Amino acid sequence: QAITLFDSVGCIASQSPVVGRGILAWLADSGFWTFDGSSLNYISDDIWELLQTITPGTQTSVVGFYWQNYFCWSFPESNLTLYWHAPNQQWSTLPFALTYASSLRSVGSDPTNVTGSATYNQVVGARTGTNIVDSWFSDPVFDLGVPVESDWQGPVSDVGLPDATFTVKYL
């Protein structure tokens, strides 16, 4: 159920809210905002002109996600991702976007240890206009040709099974 936090600032995209570092950040029609439980802050001054080039219809399809102190928003129709580094409050861009995204928590060598402080060291998402799943920020040498292996479990409609587990390797 949606709750009203502020009468003057709304959220224009259902997938734009991002939570990290005890901060909620989202896209409103006036730009990006953060809320830390006590203070509402406008953070779009540095990117205001860039935001004006993104049409309102494109803004409503934004996809937000969090990764290691970065609040990120992908605009699939513009093939653009904006990311804001919370500690130094600086904006940057990436020339590609995800249609769907999820941050994955690192559990280190003990996958049963989920009580410690969360480290989100990977973002997995669907590439715009495809059924290709990308892994962002998974390893400092990920883009240098090192094989990456991941497991996926879910419904598989083409094999007639309710679910199956696959191991996928990218070379």
Image (cartoon, grey):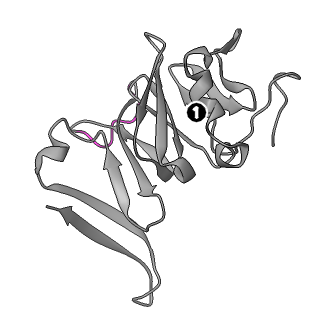
The image shows residue 69 at horizontal and vertical percentages of 42, 22
The image shows residue 142 at horizontal and vertical percentages of 18, 44
Q: For the residue carrying disc 1, how many other residues have a C-alpha within 10 Å: few (<14), some (14-19), or many (20+)?
A: some
The residue beneath circle 1 is 18
Please tell me in which quadrant of the rendered image residue 120 appears: top left
Please tell me in which quadrant of the rendered image residue 167 appears: bottom left
Query: Left of 145 or right of it: where is 71?
Result: right
Quadrant for the N terminus in the image: top right
Query: Left of 1 or right of it: where is 145?
Result: left
Q: Is residue 113 magenta?
A: yes
The image shows residue 50 at horizontal and vertical percentages of 57, 29
Quadrant for the C terminus in the image: bottom left
**Rendered view: 105 above or below 166:** above
Q: Nearer the viewer, residue 22 or 63?
A: 63
Q: Residue at x 47, y 39 (%)?
A: 81
Q: Residue at x 32, y 37 (%)?
A: 106
Q: Residue at x 58, y 20 (%)?
A: 23
Q: Nearer the viewer, residue 7 or 109?
A: 7
Q: Nearer the viewer, residue 110 or 42?
A: 42
**Rendered view: 162 above or below 124:** below
**Rendered view: 131 above or below 122:** below
The image shows residue 76 at horizontal and vertical percentages of 53, 51
Q: Is residue 159 magenta?
A: no
User: Is disc 1 placed on a helix, strand or loop?
Assistant: strand
Q: Residue at x 65, y 48 (%)?
A: 58
Question: Which amino acid, by three-letter code, is at mark 1?
Answer: Val
Image: magenta residue range: 110-116
Considering the whole magenta stretch, tell me its main secondary structure.
loop
